[in-house]
Image (cartoon, rainbow, N blue to C red):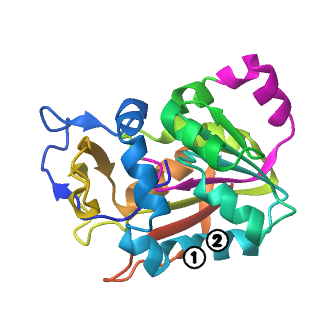
């Protein structure tokens, strides 16, 4: 999903998620869809206003894709923004949360948004959907994950993304900057800074920079360019291409 930088609570449980927490999968994002959509559209996420949205759009404009897949598109803000910045770019958004796809379609009736989980993407279940099969019949120039990779094992998703790329294409990942210690593990997000009482807390897996590179390499990708993290960085931005 398209997410933003908050201040998650650290947990030291590297082997498993904290007891009682909800994983950052389709179910929890479906439950949080209304509150998340309001947070994005009412610009309640400070880091996005401070530069992460603009940084991603600048990178995508530089890459100038003719065809783009927004994996984890959430309520669809990126595809709407791309229409303004890159009107000649064909863009498709997929997300595993039904309520977010409903929100995306309602805000952008002419856009292309489809319900598809990462597991279904990796299993190529989309080939059984005539509409998706037609729209993904040709490779894409960019697959973008904007704060949308929260699982501990992201390798199947990255392999699926690589398989969709045209020659010379790129996987673009914007995510939270690795912690200074490089420690990995589950974190809990409470969403307290957004001022809503209806959030369902979720867990997501924080990984080191080395772990990101390892996952990319396992998928046959290598990071060619990046926005280098600094002590006050709002995000880590990776642009990876096939080896």
Q: Which mark is residue 189?
A: none
Neighbour tally class for label 1: few under 14, some 14-19, many 20 plus, Cα within 10 Å:
few
Residue 63 in view here: no
| Residues at marks 1 and 2, CA–CA distance in whole angstroms | 5 Å
Q: Nearer the viewer, residue 213 or 195?
A: 195
218 vs 236, left or right, is right
Q: Is residue 78 above or below residue 34?
A: below
SS of the residue at dot 1? helix
Where does the magenta region start and end?
A: 124-149
Q: Is residue 230 magenta?
A: no
**Residue ID for mark 2:** 57
Tell me the quarter of the picture where residue 93 sits: top right
Tell me the quarter of the picture where residue 152 sits: top left
Neighbour tally class for label 2: few under 14, some 14-19, many 20 plus, Cα within 10 Å:
some
On the image, the x and y values in percent for residue 154 come to: 46, 41
**Residue ID for mark 1:** 54
SS of the residue at dot 2? helix
On the image, the x and y values in percent for residue 140 come to: 79, 48
On the image, the x and y values in percent for residue 63 come to: 75, 69
Q: Which residue appears at 82% of the width and 59% of the height?
A: 89
Q: Nearer the viewer, residue 99 or 130?
A: 99
Q: Nearer the viewer, residue 180 or 220?
A: 180
Q: Is residue 211 above or below residue 233?
A: above
236 vs 102, left or right, is left
26 vs 130, left or right, is left
Q: Which residue appears at 40% of the width and 59% of the height?
A: 39
Q: Which residue appears at 22% of the width and 58% of the height?
A: 8
Q: Is residue 142 magenta?
A: yes
Residue 118 in view here: yes
Q: List the single residue furthest toward the top.
A: 128
For the C terminus, the quadrant is: bottom right
Q: Are marks 1 and 2 in contact (CB under 8 Å)?
A: yes
């Amino acid at each position: 999903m398209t997410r933003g930088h908050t201040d998650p609570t650290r947990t030291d449980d590297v082997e498993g998620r904290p007891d009682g927490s909800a994983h950052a999968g389709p179910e929890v994002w479906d439950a949080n869809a209304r509150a998340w959509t309001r947070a994005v559209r009412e610009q309640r996420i400070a880091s996005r206003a401070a530069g992460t949205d603009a940084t991603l759009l600048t990178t995508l404009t530089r890459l100038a894709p003719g065809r783009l897949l927004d994996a984890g598109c959430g309520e669809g803000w990126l595809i709407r923004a791309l229409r303004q910045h890159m009107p000649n770019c064909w863009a498709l958004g997929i997300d595993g949360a039904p309520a977010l796809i409903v929100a995306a379609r309602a805000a952008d009736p002419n856009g292309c948004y489809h319900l598809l989980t990462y597991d279904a993407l990796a299993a190529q279940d989309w080939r059984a959907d005539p509409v998706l099969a037609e729209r993904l019949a040709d490779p894409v120039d960019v697959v973008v994950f904007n704060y949308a990779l929260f699982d501990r094992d992201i390798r199947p998703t990255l392999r699926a993304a690589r398989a969709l790329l045209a020659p010379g294409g790129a996987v673009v990942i914007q995510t939270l900057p690795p912690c200074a210690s490089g420690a990995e593990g589950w974190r809990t997000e409470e969403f307290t800074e957004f001022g809503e009482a209806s959030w369902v807390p979720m867990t997501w897996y924080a990984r080191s920079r080395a772990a990101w590179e390892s996952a990319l390499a396992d998928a046959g990708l290598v990071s060619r360019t990046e926005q280098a993290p600094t002590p006050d960085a709002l995000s880590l931005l990776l642009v990876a291409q096939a080896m």
